[in-house]
Image (spheres, rainbow, N blue to C red):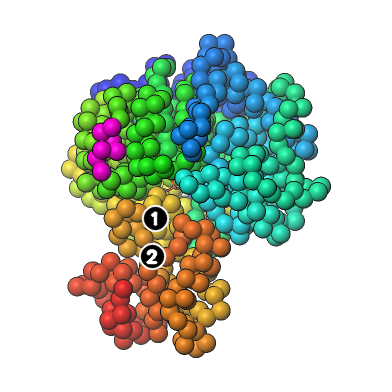
Amino acid sequence: MSNYHIKNLEEYFQVYRKSVQNPENFWGEIAEENFLWRKTWDKVLEYDLSKPEVSWFKGAKLNITENCIDRHLFSRGEKTAIIFEPNDPSEKAQHITYNELHERVCKFANVLKNQGVKKGDRVCIYLPMIPELAVSVLACARIGAIHSVVFAGFSASALATRINDCDCKIVISSDGSFRGSKSIDLKGIVDEALKSCDGVSSVLVAKRTNTEVQMKEGCDVWLQPLLDEASSNCPAEMMDAEDPLFILYTSGSTGKPKGMVHTTAGYMVYSAYTFKNVFQYREADVYWCTADIGWITGHSYIVYGPLANGATTVMFEGVPSYPNHGRFWEIVEKHKITQFYTAPTAIRALAKEKIDFVEKHDLSSLKVLGTVGEPINEEAWHWYNDAIGHQKCPIVDTWWQTETGGIMISPIPYATPAIPTFATLPLPGIQPALMDENGKELEGNQVSGRLCIKFPWPAMARTIWGNHERYRETYFSTFENSYFTGDGALRNSTGFYRITGRVDDVIIVSGHNLGTAPIEDAINEHPAVAESAIVGFPHEVKGNALYGYVILKESGESRNQDNLRKEINQMISDRIGPIAKLDKIQFTSGLPKTRSGKIMRRILRKIASKDIKDLGDTSTLLNPEVVQEIIDNAL
Ligand code: WTA
């Protein structure tokens, strides 16, 4: 276990140095000592970032579910693997032991097999945060099927795009979902999506809300009777280290969503290693990450990372405001949570509520607090530290991405000194670099630039499903032999990193990545709209909110503007999901464009943020006069 668990700063530096000097030895040792392999690798790392091609642990054979479940059965069979906390606090929480999880995953895996699912097939999972979600993810991994989880807040059209992009044969869903006081007709959304998905042969439907749904003959099947009949014996499929484990879609600044492909061995080693260190996880801990498994945070730090460590991980079905704003803290007290991992947007929202909601609850079980998804502002950081951590719990501000598979830059509790708003130092094996606009690396400290990673790490995505060229172009063409993150960052005088935000056209709203292009496409589908541009502007709770500039066609000019605004937001909701709705919509006669026809978003961003003192150089614009009109009518 030499490298596996870092306990202080000196050890961190020592381990970090080793990881950079000899990455192959470093990761080879960690992999060998801490995981179950059916066959070990021929080579730890092979790579060429210009292509880019990266393989970790080439030649090894394994199954990630044997590492997440089977190997724990001897020593931890009766330990709780998953605590399911339902939306409604009066419904009993479920404690699923490792033995039970094993049985449920094997049965589910056999159901998939009986449905004709084979190694390499893609399975779409569109489920709320109920145990079936974790179980179905693991069941796919058990038989080598590639899971593609789609967050259950996405619309029918967004779901269909994702199902078709990777040709899923099977969809796993439920009758409905509970979110706070609402019940959502998930099956109806699936039905709508499937109108444009010819390749889907069956939909397995879990019961959650017991609402009435239409079951299409020859396609829709209730899941429970199949599970009841299935055998609980399902030997794990032997996977190659580089076999795909899952696809997860993330927004790009242009075009359709990118299906990031993560592979088996490297992802397993890295998610487990980072979980252990960043959360300082110990055997008796009860760890809770409030994310949804529909996002990468849930994949790596609700399911795979914790289970690979034999941890107890909490799945919460509901929302932080139901039945009141004390729900998170009530759950912390109820399950004696030791590590709590959430998003800055949730912290900001809860910090606005009465402190009674917090103070009513005993939070003394907490040891480590984490945040992820967007930069955390200083005020929110302090509230988290004071009100929740009572200044006794190290805060880990973890920077990473869907593409990186695991946490990249983060404090390690009790080792790295925490500085508010700083993600601090790279984890072992991670070699960040800051680049200037010309692609030159900025050496030394007190610099800011574009954040890149110069060397491969085990959990990096290997490609975009069906489009390797887009993968190369998006991430590896801006800076030579480096992965470009799309984020800007600064390195302070002591070498600590602070992430300053996206430098591309991705906007992070309440921790969700939204690309401008798909939203603009949705708006432009409205018959009255000629053209549109979306930018982000600062929002107290959401971090950023969306501001849309819309040019109407002649036919739209006589329409009532408030009605148009509602219709446009409805279009966005239908095409993408409610998370992408615009807070403000300004109608305008034109958009500032360069001579090559590119919209100058920089100017629109400044106007939306009410920061018009210095708009920068507008002389290169094709239509500088439109800027004043936009300023005059700004919302
Ligand atoms: C942003 C989420 C600042 C960043 C795991 C990144 C952060 C994007 C942080 C990825 C953080 C994530 N501080 N910004 N601690 N964590 N981000 O793919 O812009 O949903 O590129 O992965 O979120 O979002 P994604």
Q: Mark 2 packing: few (<14 Cα in 10 Å), some, or many (20+)?
A: some
User: Residue 13 versus residue 152: which sits nearer the camera?
Assistant: 152
Asked if the magenta segment contains residue 245, the reply would be no
Q: What is the number of the mark on residue 218?
A: none
Residue under circle 2? 583
Q: Residue at x 28, y 46 (%)?
A: 353
Estimate the spatial distance between the alpha carbons at disc 2 and disc 1, rounded to whole Å. 11 Å
Q: Residue furthest right?
A: 218
* Image height of 394 relative to 584, above or below: above
Q: Residue at x 23, y 73 (%)?
A: 612
Percent position (x, y) of residue 430?
38, 37
Residue under circle 1? 509
**Left or right: where 537 falls relative to 309:** left
Q: Residue at x 47, y 84 (%)?
A: 559
Q: Amino acid at mark 2?
A: Asp
**Left or right: where 32 falls relative to 326:** right
Asked if the magenta segment contains residue 357, the reply would be yes
Q: Residue furthest front?
A: 90
Looking at the figure, which quarter contains the C terminus?
bottom left
Percent position (x, y) of residue 485?
41, 50
User: Residue 281 versus residue 274: which sits nearer the camera?
Assistant: 281
Q: Total label count?
A: 2
Percent position (x, y) of residue 476?
47, 52
What is the span of residues highlighted in magenta in the rendered image? 354-360
Residue 241 sits in quarter: top right
Residue 262 sits in quarter: top right
Q: Residue at x 73, y 27 (%)?
A: 228
